[in-house]
Image (cartoon, rainbow, N blue to C red):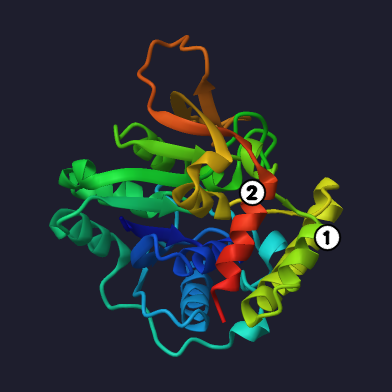
Amino acid sequence: MQKSVIIDCDPGIDDAISLAMAVASPELRILGVTTTYGNVGIEHTTDNALRVIDWLGSQVPVYEGARRALVADRVNAAQYHGATGLESPALGRPKRVAETTGAIPFLIDALLHLPQEVTLVALGPLTNIALAMRLEPRILPRIAQIVLMGGSTDYGNDSPAAEFNMLSDPHAAQIVFSSEVPVVMFGLNVTHQIIATPEEMAKIRALGNEAATVVGDMLAFFQAVYVERYGFAGAALHDPCTIAYLLQPDIFTLRTMHVDVETNAGLSFGRTVHDIWGLTGKPKNTLVATKADAGRFFDLLRSCLARLR
């Protein structure tokens, strides 16, 4: 059975790899790609989504979404992804433009009128999804689940406490976590277990097709930042964990708990707060990934790339 998905993203290198995995997987029916500000501004993320989708030879429509957070100040991750978010000349220029319908009207219409429930895959700030929920609450029972990359059970990467996607719009994230829609969360605590070491990058390049070469070049750019800033052995593949979960969920170990997002200004602004021991008595609202089998993840990534040109 195909899973119907909408991918909400802010490409970004790891977003691009996620899109490649999804397009290569017949198990997923991609209804649309919605873009949001995040890694870089919306003018770049939309352009990058179109570039990636065109390069993949897909006809999936792209819808442009939010330009800024609900309340929080603008942050970006150009230091990780480059000034345009995707410094990959091999992708070329997009052959088409985004749909005239915006991301939020598209989300609402698709969720209200499609005959099947839809999984939302959220790879950036959660502004689009939160706005759609607030504007049309009838969509909530139509969402099968939200599989997202964001947060952490331990420490942050854009502040000492907060992960980038959550810090970009904590208020939107809290709306999503408190919506009673099932949430599956891939935070830094697990995505930092998926490291594209030089050995893994060599295996990807050894596939020999264009997709492997382009992804290998993207990872080489990404790797340099992670080695310099964090001392990692390679780049952490954050966003692709969501697609890997939809394809092979047993790659990950997960635990159900209550998660909130800190929306008050201060040192912990944007932090995901995990009630691991049930101390608050609040209902468990999130399935949180805690461990990953990196070897199986990279086997899956290579099998996806091998299906592309």
Q: Secondary structure at mark 2?
A: helix
Three-letter amino acid code of the residue under disc 1: Pro
Q: Residue at x 25, y 64 (%)?
A: 106
Q: CA distance from mark 1 to mark 2?
A: 17 Å
Left-right relation of 249 to 238: left
Three-letter amino acid code of the residue under disc 2: Arg
The residue labelled by disc 1 is 198
Q: Secondary structure at mark 1?
A: helix
Q: Residue at x 52, y 82 (%)?
A: 55
Which residue is at the front of the view, 266 or 153?
153
The quarter holding residue 36 reads bottom left
Crowd band around label 2 with a 10 angstrom C-alpha radius: few (<14), some (14–19), many (20+): some
Left-right relation of 248 to 5: right
Left-right relation of 102 to 48: left
Which residue is at the front of the view, 64 or 294?
294
Q: Is residue 263 visible?
A: no
Whether 16 is drawn above or below 289: the answer is below
Which residue is at the front of the view, 132 or 197?
197
Q: Is residue 261 visible?
A: yes
The residue labelled by disc 2 is 296
Residue 214: x and y, percent? Answer: 67, 77
Q: Mark 1, mark 2: which one is toward the viewer? A: 2
| CB under 8 Å between discs 1 and 2 | no
Residue 58: x and y, percent? Answer: 42, 79
Which residue is at the front of the view, 170 or 211?
211
Whether 211 is drawn above or below 199: the answer is below
Q: Residue at x 83, y 60 (%)?
A: 198
Q: Residue at x 62, y 73 (%)?
A: 84
The quarter holding residue 15 reads bottom right
Crowd band around label 1 with a 10 angstrom C-alpha radius: few (<14), some (14–19), many (20+): some
